[in-house]
Image (cartoon, rainbow, N blue to C red):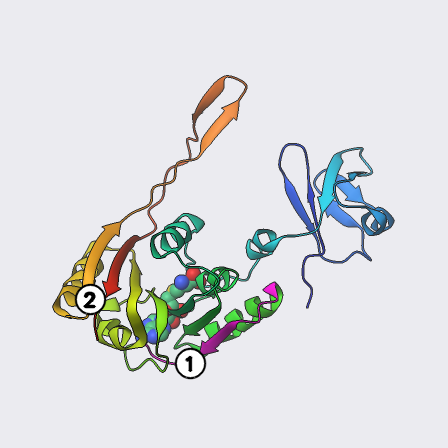
Amino acid sequence: MNTIKKVLITSQGRKFYAKDLNEDLHTQYGFIKKEDLKKAKEGSLLKSNTNKEFFIFNPSFIDLYRKIKRDAQIIPLKDIGLIIAETGLNKKSRVLDAGSGSGALACFLAAIAKEVISYEIREDFIEIVKFNIEFLGLKNIKIKNIDIYNKIEEKNIDVVILDVPEPWNAVDNCSKALKIGGFLVSYSPSVPQVADFVNAVKKNESFVYLKTSEVVEREWEVEERRVRPKSKGIGHSGFLSFARKVKN
Ligand code: SAH
């Protein structure tokens, strides 16, 4: 697998990835010789043929994650952050997510959790997820070709996250798969989906509904004393609804 071997960053924060240390790395600031890439120590400064400077270091998870293959709309980092924070997802957690899509959420959570199981109905997406799992070198994630509206094979799950068009159709299956005290999270782009999901959760006596939130992240520009929000618009991603399983 042609994974990323080194990260190079300019002092202005422009990032480049070297996949093959046996080839020169070409950038818009000129190229860096393969000999320099190979012998560079972490944190050392390299120069391109046009004298532009780059710091070099080994990739960490987030560097690799930002380069995964993506097809279906992947969940943004800001929303992953709230899921982790609200559920307290950690190295002891067994997590189930559906649908996998490109596996972005499943892979991010696998880097934190004990185990992730991901359900996906489309074979072409399953191939992308498998590629990404290998690209990231994850060993604790399983992908299954299962329709979550039909069944969940696992039991005693700590957190289930739904990113499917009709999450209300999976609520009863999720209640059986979750352990008592476990969390059900649903991620949906539109308001009618939130209404139908939350109403289904409220009808199911195993769950207590907690809350629905939207995370708005606004990036700021900091140039000397010119400090202001970036003019780029804030796009909408989705709403996150949280429920907790309280009894069987
Ligand atoms: N969270 C994912 C993106 C999910 S996109 C990521 O971060 O990459 C939604 C996916 O759900 C699509 O790939 C779709 O094929 C899948 N899907 C739709 N209905 C499903 C179902 N009933 N069971 C499992 N997967 C389903």
**Quarter of the render that holds ligand 1:** bottom left
Looking at the image, the residue that sits furthest to the top is: 225
Spatial CA span between label 1 and label 2: 27 Å
- Mark 2 residue CB less than 8 A from any atom of ligand 1: no
Q: Tags 1 and 2 in contact by the CB under 8 Å rule?
A: no
Q: Along the line of sight, which residue is nearer the eye, 113 or 49? A: 113
Residue 84 shows in the view: yes
Residue type beneath disc 1: Asn
Q: Main secondary structure of the magenta part?
A: loop
- Which residues make up the magenta segment? 136-148
- Mark 1 residue CB less than 8 A from any atom of ligand 1: no
60 is higher (above) or lower (below) than 9: below
Residue type beneath disc 2: Phe
- Is residue 60 left or right of 148 when viewed as pictured? right
Residue 179: image x %, image y %? 31, 72
Residue 110: image x %, image y %? 50, 64
Q: Which residue is mark 2?
A: 207
Quarter occupied by residue 209: bottom left
- Is residue 45 left or right of 162 when viewed as pictured? right
Residue 133: image x %, image y %? 56, 68
2 is higher (above) or lower (below) than 238: below
Quarter occupied by residue 54: top right
Q: Tell me what residue is drawn at x 45 percent, y 65 percent.
A: 92
Of the residues tagged 1 and 2, which is closer to the observer? 2
135 is higher (above) or lower (below) than 18: below
Q: Which residue is mark 1?
A: 145
Residue 72 shows in the view: no
Q: Residues within 10 Å of mark 2 (few under 14, many from 20)?
A: many
Mark 1 residue element: loop
Which corner quadrant holds the C terminus?
bottom left
